[in-house]
Image (tube, helix red, strand yellow):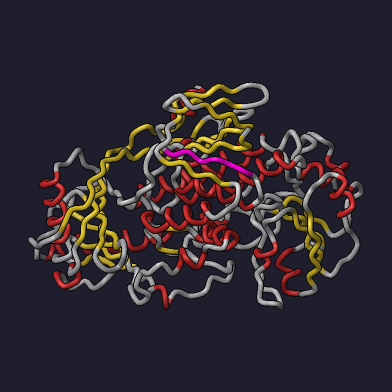
């Protein structure tokens, strides 16, 4: 029997395969397509995703895949590339990007046609991971002790658990009768991938990561550099089905002149804002777009899905290895569904910022009225869109698992900042454990991942390794005698989960070490009196 069967070979399914395979858990991934990626549905690889890639050993590939290091990522608001410039949000190139104080990594520009193959190579390199493309799930049966999957062609697979990473149209979610809640249709949009090697020579705006084109009805499209050389994506914010000639016409409208180029793909999609009412059952779990879809504004969809895969992965591994308790898998919904709703809310704010519902009849005019409306609109957009594009650290790093049944709270969590770019690290239970550089050149984040980690700051008072061994629970103890790190972590003893989130902290050892470990591994329910685990 397969421990975990993953359905869906996109970035979320591949990330889950990596998370499981890296923990020594055999898994099989099936994908009905051939795995080839031409269209870039996503470009922005978030800083938290890069931290996970760092643990998987592929962060360098994601950062340095070949995008020109001197290419600026400015966001430029224009009537067209050959027309007027309204405003510019200056963003540095790769080589000029400043170090982020709160992380050993940074945001990365990595289009899906680059990112997915990196994940695929990593997953394929792991013993126990089987990738099967051109394989379609027809139906499944969830039983008390297994899931029986029936594949196209008559093959049957049995698995302990089934993970549905099969996108918004998830057949697995529909078979479970799970509803999606929210806005089923905001509008329909179009992605046009095209090749134009000399695009920068056709205008005077200079290279930029994104050009937002604005017409009489406001922003109508964005043009994004895919590879920094010749591949581009034009996203039309609100359009119907386009023929290839109409797609070419839209590209010429955005550029503002006639020129030679090659349309590669035209993809029509629906902009939605939805979160599933639940994330699974006893043996079937859902992740990624199968449980949350949001506007792409801010680049949160795929990155939120990677967070799902990491959370689900270590918990499935713990149950497979025998040390995860009965409440552990139930905590997946309790933790990731609020995280999905948080990401959807932020994506909607970004969508609302860039879609002012006003008419600007003079925006193309070389008149005083035209200059005025361009200046006013440019000033508004350049301020409002900074939260989405200018290192929104709190959006990507600040999600928390407050109220999780497997964390032990110790007071009110830190307040959520109004500015998404402001992220203050904290060791409060449920949140991401802080990054700090250690004397040997490693980040504290490099200490996490294999199992639980107890950090002891200038303290040797508690060593729960004996209790952990009795439970078969992987746990390492790391002593850090650094004053700055101790201040950052706020407590002398901090227990960090395999996914890098804090489970428990205190200045003194708990009265019952076993109860703390049992709570963290899901072996006791969260209604255990607080004094028994603190």
Residue 145 in percent (x, y) is at 67, 25
In the displayed structure, 306 sits above or below 146; it is below
Q: Quadrant of residue 109?
A: bottom left
Which is more toward the observer, 366 or 190?
A: 190
Task: Inspect the magenta stretch and tell me whether residue 30 lies in it.
Answer: yes
In the displayed structure, 179 sits above or below 87; it is above
Residue 61 in percent (x, y) is at 47, 65
In this picture, which residue range is highlighted in magenta? Answer: 26-31
Determine the residue positioned at 64% across, 28% down.
Answer: 282
Q: Main secondary structure of the magenta part?
A: strand
Q: Is residue 498 left or right of residue 63?
A: right
Which is more toward the observer, 312 or 100?
A: 312
Residue 503 in percent (x, y) is at 73, 50
Q: Quadrant of residue 432?
A: bottom right
Determine the residue positioned at 19% across, 48% down.
Answer: 217
Q: Quadrant of residue 254?
A: bottom left
Which is more toward the observer, 43 or 510?
A: 43
- Position of the N terminus by quadrant: top right
Q: Is residue 48 left or right of residue 475?
A: left
Does residue 11 appear in this view?
yes
């Amino acid at each position: 029997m397969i421990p975990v069967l993953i359905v869906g070979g996109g970035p979320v399914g591949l990330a889950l395969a990596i998370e499981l395979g890296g923990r020594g858990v055999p898994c099989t991934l099936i994908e009905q397509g051939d795995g080839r990626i031409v269209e870039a549905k996503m470009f922005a690889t978030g800083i938290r995703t890069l931290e996970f890639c760092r643990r998987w050993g592929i962060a360098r590939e994601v950062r340095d895949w070949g995008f020109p290091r001197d290419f600026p990522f400015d966001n430029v608001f224009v009537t067209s590339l050959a027309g007027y410039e309204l405003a510019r949000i200056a963003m540095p190139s790769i080589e000029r990007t400043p170090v982020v104080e709160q992380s050993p990594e940074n945001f990365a520009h990595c289009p899906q046609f680059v990112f997915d193959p990196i994940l695929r190579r990593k997953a394929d390199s792991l013993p126990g991971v089987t990738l099967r493309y051109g394989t379609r799930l027809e139906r499944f049966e969830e039983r008390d002790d297994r899931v029986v999957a029936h594949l196209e062609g008559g093959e049957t697979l049995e698995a302990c658990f089934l993970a549905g990473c099969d996108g918004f149209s998830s057949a697995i979610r529909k078979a479970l009768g799970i509803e999606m809640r929210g806005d089923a249709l905001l509008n329909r949009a179009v992605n046009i991938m095209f090749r134009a090697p000399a695009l920068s020579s056709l205008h005077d705006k200079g290279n930029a990561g994104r050009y937002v084109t604005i017409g009489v009805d406001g922003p109508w499209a964005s043009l994004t550099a895919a590879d920094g050389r010749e591949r581009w994506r034009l996203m039309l914010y609100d359009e119907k089905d386009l023929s290839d000639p109409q797609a070419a016409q839209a590209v010429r409208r955005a550029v503002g002149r006639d020129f030679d180029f090659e349309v590669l793909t035209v993809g029509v999609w629906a902009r939605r804002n939805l979160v599933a009412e639940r994330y699974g059952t006893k043996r079937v779990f859902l992740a990624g777009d199968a449980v949350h879809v949001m506007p792409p504004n801010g680049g949160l969809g795929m990155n939120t899905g990677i967070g799902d895969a990491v959370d689900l992965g270590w918990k499935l591994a713990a149950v497979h290895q025998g040390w995860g308790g009965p409440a552990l898998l139930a905590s997946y919904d309790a933790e990731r569904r609020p995280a999905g709703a948080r990401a959807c809310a932020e994506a909607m704010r970004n969508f609302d910022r860039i879609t002012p519902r006003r008419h600007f009849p003079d925006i193309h005019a070389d008149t005083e009225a035209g200059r005025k409306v361009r200046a006013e609109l440019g000033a508004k957009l350049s301020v409002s869109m900074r939260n989405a594009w200018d290192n929104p650290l709190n959006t990507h790093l600040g999600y928390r698992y407050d109220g999780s049944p497997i964390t032990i709270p110790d007071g009110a969590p830190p307040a959520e900042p109004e500015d998404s770019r402001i992220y203050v690290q904290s060791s409060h239970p449920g949140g991401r454990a802080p990054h700090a550089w250690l004397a040997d050149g490693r980040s504290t984040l490099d200490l996490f991942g294999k199992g639980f980690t107890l950090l002891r700051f200038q303290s040797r008072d508690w060593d729960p390794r004996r209790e952990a061994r009795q439970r078969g629970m992987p746990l390492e103890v790391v002593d850090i005698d650094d004053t700055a790190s101790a201040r950052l972590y706020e407590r002398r003893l901090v227990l960090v989960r395999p996914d890098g989130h804090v489970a428990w902290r205190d200045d003194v050892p708990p009265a019952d070490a076993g109860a703390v470990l049992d709570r963290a591994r899901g072996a006791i329910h969260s209604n255990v009196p607080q004094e028994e685990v603190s």
